[in-house]
Amino acid sequence: MKPENSPSAPPEKKQPIWKALASVNLTIFLLIFLAVSSIVGTLIPQNGPPALYIQNYGYGTYQFLDSLSLLDLYHAGWFRLLLLLLALNLIVCTTDRLRHVWDIVFPKEKRLDEKAVLARPGTRALKYKANPSVVKAALLPILSGKLGDLNETTAGSTTILWREKGRLSRLGVYVVHLSVVIFYIAGIASSLGGFRSSVNLPEGAVAEQVCLPNTDVDYKLGFALRVDKFEAQFYPTGEPKDYRSDVTIIEKGQPVLSGNIRVNHPLTYKGITFYQASYGRFPKAIELNLVDKTSGKTIPLSVPFGQEAILPDGLGTLRSLRAEPNVMDKGPAVQMLLTSPEGGQTDFWIFKNDPDFGRISKLPYRFIVTEVREGFYTGLQVAKEPGIPFVWAGSILMVLGIAVTFFMSHRKIWAVLEKKGEGTTVTIGGQTNKNKLGLEERLDNLYLQLQKSDIK
Amino acid sequence: MLSSKILAVVTFSYLAAVIFYLIALIFKTKIGQRIGSIITIGTFVAHTAAIILRWVESHKLGIGHAPFANFYESLVFFAWAIILIHFIAEYKYKIAHVGAFTVPFAFLSLTYAAFSPGISSRIEPLVPALQSNWLIAHVITCFIGYGAFAVSCGLSIAYLLKRSNDKKDLDALNYRMIIFGFLFLTAGIATGSIWAHSAWGAYWQWDPKETWSLITWFVYAIILHVRLRGWHGKKIALLSIGGFLSVLFTYFGVNFLLSGLHSYIN
């Protein structure tokens, strides 16, 4: 029982470069090189600011690392070259072997190499008193089973009953190699036709374009996304439970789609997908009480950010500039801009806990901050990944390919019937391209079954 | 929590099983092997029950989710996966004494989960990033893969220690375990990548966890290819131990030494 080894290339004259690119040694070398470089990439922080490296490693080392592109290793030219070489290696190796394998997998007719079988038929022999044709008739129901159709080949007075299974499994390894190439296509498609960006939008804001990272270029969405509401929910323990942005897609001034974006539940419109990535608070308006210095009468006034609030009695307008949690160690404070009716501008701070500190004496009011109203902004990741169907296809093919490659085998099992005097000798044997243990087990079972049967 | 109490008993039961397997190995007694096997089966049943119970308990707390939400739960599941794969080696391939080399990994994982001061056994609610159906597919595929690699590492140690010339079966099974682990690691990376796309908007970002899972994948891909060049036995055993070190770094090292997107695991 000689196992068929991996089919080797047909003996043609080949260019040395072709031979090198088709070799498994190159594959092993490239995999080791890729693994080691990837480790280096996880030990040196990637894409950090130069100051970080200079501080940690010194200027000379920083320059050295930068000259080898080790600070953005996974996008470096040499790393891509390694990946490209691996792809070439896979493709050349596959074309080199596939033609030969194809003939085995799709033979013009079913065949058995009788000479090879008769040279080493196997060690499991049984002797019967009946003549070969009687024994054959008795063997048929036992042998024809799950493995496939039973074939018969005669060589002189010897009859070989054989069956074959799993020819297609020889293609499994090429499916795995193909899937790797499909992942490359995914990467290329995403980097050529895709983009990724992020945008922070307060409630009520509308985005029509996003800024592409590391460039000044704006990407026009072709529609507008309005954030109607953002909500963060928490468990009683304080851990986050849900982040949700309610949004409306607006096209040509008309709302066309309303929906929400949550973590793990992105929203896709016209190939562009929005993901919930982060959130934050920002001051929306400052609520003031104006207390008349003489009468003590209180007038509430709301001063929104980005808009002017009109002071009573034609005293001018007020604008909110900043709201800070702690100024001069005196606690929360807001900065306001006062525009007088004549057009003169003054800015001043109002301290929430000490309203009379640094007040403007020209005006007939005291200012008291009652509340800084906050709104949410939502941080959305905006992306277009045309590679994703390829990622799906590559993943499915790779998993199936590995399963077929390693868990299915191309097997032949045979029974050689030889006439010995008046009786018959039957020898059970087989061959497989992998998992010899499994075949031996299978042959043992068959042998036992034949020993137990009542064939004479 | 009842499940945590069961798991404490489970931890020590595995230790008892290991002791009996070792007695069987050292004193060549069949009875030790038998007792070790029986304890392992019984403990595995309790282990499985504890995982299911934890799931039920989380629902009773009103934060129901599969018990794959934090580091503690992942260690418990890792141990479970190791024992599951161990059964394949012990019963399907009938490798005697394999328990002495595989069950210790499960015991160590559970011990670490129980006694490390930084690990909380509390049932925690699921943070938004983990609220996905991909969680179950991703965790199960990864940990079945890790379990197979742990068993392969155990078989490799057994191979290196065994003083006999008849070690072919051990080598053949070791190779099959690597293949099995490789299949599940591939599926684990694939599900992780597709999940990352729906959670973060990018299927591959060279985050340390992603990169180390790929490094581990490279290591086992190298083993499968050198096997094609005829390597077997001791060389494969040594490489498999190296591969498992890479698994351990992917699982623990990345969490503690490198920061990245998976850091919420702690």
Image (cartoon, coloured by chain):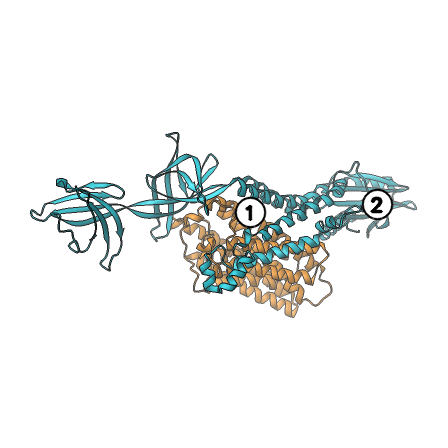
Chain given the colour orange: B
User: Please, what secondary structure does the residue beneath circle 2 have?
Assistant: strand
Label 1 sits on a secondary structure element that is helix
Answer above or below: position of A261 versus B77: above
Rendered location of residue A26, percent (x, y): 69, 53
Residue contact at pointers 2 and 1, CB within 8 angstroms:
no
Report the front residue among A451 and A259.
A259
Which quadrant is home to the N terminus of chain B? bottom left
Residue bearing mark 1:
B190
Q: What residue type is labelled 1?
A: Ala
- Residue designated by label 2: A416
Quadrant of res B165: bottom right
Circle 2 residues within 10 Å: few <14, some 14–19, many ≥20: many
**Residue A93, how many percent across, how many down?**
70, 47
Q: Is residue A352 left or right of residue B32?
A: left
The x, y position of residue A329, in whole percent, is 24, 60
Q: Which chain carries label 1?
A: B
The Cα–Cα distance between marks 2 and 1, rounded to whole angstroms, is 47 Å
In screen coordinates, is A201 left or right of B86?
left
Residue pictured at 70% horizontal, 52% vertical: A24
Q: Quadrant of residue A257?
A: top left
**Type of amino acid under label 2:** Val
